[in-house]
Amino acid sequence: MYDYGECHVCGQRMEEKHVKQDFWVKGKLIVIEEVPAGVCPQCGEKVVKADVGRSIAALVGNSKRLRKARTMNVPVIRFAREVA
Ligand SMILES: [Zn+2]
């Protein structure tokens, strides 16, 4: 198992997890599932290995793959200060 070391934010030991990660690419939101990443159990900071980062860049740049990908609807709301 890859050692992600300690969280650069809070110093907690990072744990390897598979996460869902969202990316904005040319104004489009792309979600990649099952990304291997180091996740801080304390503050939630995430890091990926350099080769994983390269694979992500290749995936989001693969327009053929994106066309075939399934999509999901997400709620979009405008910011407002809610009165509790
Ligand atoms: Zn942390």
Image (cartoon, helix red, strand yellow):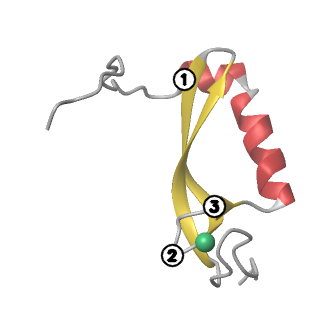
Please identify the quarter of the rendering in which residue 39 is found.
bottom right
State which image quarter holds ligand 1: bottom right
Structural crowding at the residue carrying mark 2, measured as other residues with C-alpha within 10 Å and reported as few (<14), some (14–19) or many (≥20): few
Ligand 1 closer than 8 Å to label 2 CB:
yes
Structural crowding at the residue carrying mark 1, measured as other residues with C-alpha within 10 Å and reported as few (<14), some (14–19) or many (≥20): few
Q: Which residue is disc 3 drawn over? A: 46
Nearer the viewer's eye, disc 1 or disc 3?
A: 3
Residue sitting at the far front: 83
Per the image, label 3 sits on a secondary structure element best described as strand
Per the image, label 2 sits on a secondary structure element best described as loop
As measured in the structure, the alpha-carbon distance from the residue carrying label 1 to the one carrying label 3 is: 28 Å
Side of 33 where 59 appears, left or right:
right
Q: Nearer the viewer, residue 41 or 21?
A: 41
Rendered residue at 79%/62% (across/down):
49
In the image, residue 49 sits, relative to residue 84, either above or below, namely below
Contact, CB < 8 Å: mark 2 with mark 3? no
Q: Which residue is disc 1 drawn over? A: 68
Q: Nearer the viewer, residue 13 or 16?
A: 13
Ligand 1 closer than 8 Å to label 1 CB:
no
Nearer the viewer's eye, disc 1 or disc 2?
A: 2
Query: Residue 43 at what x, y percent from top left?
Result: 53, 68
User: Which residue type carries mark 1?
Assistant: Lys
Q: Nearer the viewer, residue 33 or 13?
A: 13
In the image, residue 7 sits, relative to residue 23, either above or below, namely below
As measured in the structure, the alpha-carbon distance from the residue carrying label 2 to the one carrying label 3 is: 11 Å
Sooner in the amino-acid sequence: mark 1 or mark 3: 3
Mark on residue 42? 2
Query: Residue 19 at what x, y percent from top left?
Result: 52, 58
